[in-house]
Image (tube, rainbow, N blue to C red):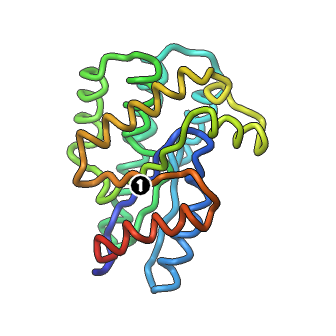
Amino acid sequence: MSLNGKFITFEGIDGAGKSTHIAALTERLRARGADVLNTREPGGTPLAEQLRELFLHKPMDGLTEALLVFAGRRDHRMTVIEPALAAGRTVLCDRFADATFAYQGHGRGMDLAVLTQLEQWVLAGRQPDLTLWFDLPAETAAQRRASARTPDRLEQLDLDFFERVRAGYAARCAQFPERFARIEAQGDIAQVWSRVEAVLEQRGW
């Protein structure tokens, strides 16, 4: 099956290994002739990248976080994602709307109905064709982050917050089983990548 015009998102708590496997999938798809666009959220456009800097480094409450990311997401969807998909490109995105439900909804305790309304307004039905959820215990993810980089504002939050975020991803996975694929993110890079490849093969991709 061709991946032309497919939209694949990568989700998981910080430290779960998404970025490594986005790069690997990009290489795999380009080797097979796909025209791949890599993008990310928060971010993906000049405007959304400015909002990302505010989001990651300025103190704010959960609703402000959600409004900022959905504002950036609207610009990202309209100016980058939709045109790329219309042109037949394969879009790989590091986080999308599921992250807001996991982080601001379950992590921050925001009303999920409010987030659902924002999602409907901003996405107008646009959902990924496939969401790869890299699932990892919060403690393991924290150990990985500590050895890799200086934490941003959200990464400094405690393990309980990240376990709530993990539970939020599990809830989204249960809600949208047709597009979600849970990837066990424990193990070395080769082991996790083999699980990603198994998902793609199951879908004929």
Give the amino acid at mark 1: Leu
Which residue is depicted at the point 31% across and 34% down? Answer: 171
Nearest to the observer: residue 13 or residue 91: 13
| Labels in figure, total | 1
Q: Name the residue tied to disc 1.
A: 132
Confirm whether residue 48 shows in the render: no
Which residue is depicted at the point 54% across and 20% down? Answer: 160
Residue 111 lies left or right of residue 61; in this view the side is left
Residue 122 locus on image (x, y percent): 30, 37
Residue 132 locus on image (x, y percent): 41, 54
User: Measured along the vertical axis of the image, is residue 97 above or below residue 132?
Assistant: above
What is the quadrant of residue 72 in the picture?
Answer: top left
User: Measured along the vertical axis of the image, is residue 33 above or below residue 176?
Assistant: below
Nearest to the observer: residue 54 or residue 92: 92
Nearest to the observer: residue 201 or residue 99: 201
Which residue is depicted at the point 63% across and 39% down? Answer: 140
Which type of secondary structure does the marked residue at label 1 adopt? strand
Residue 179 lies left or right of residue 16; in this view the side is left
Residue 141 lies left or right of residue 96; in this view the side is right
Q: Quadrant of the C terminus?
A: bottom left
Confirm whether residue 33 shows in the render: yes
Q: Quadrant of the N terminus?
A: bottom left
Residue 158 lies left or right of residue 124; in this view the side is right
Which residue is depicted at the point 31% across and 71% down? Answer: 202
Residue 85 locus on image (x, y percent): 33, 65
Residue 112 locus on image (x, y percent): 29, 22
Mark 1 burial class by Cα count in 10 Å: few <14, some 14-19, many 20+: many
User: Measured along the vertical axis of the image, is residue 135 above or below residue 66?
Assistant: below
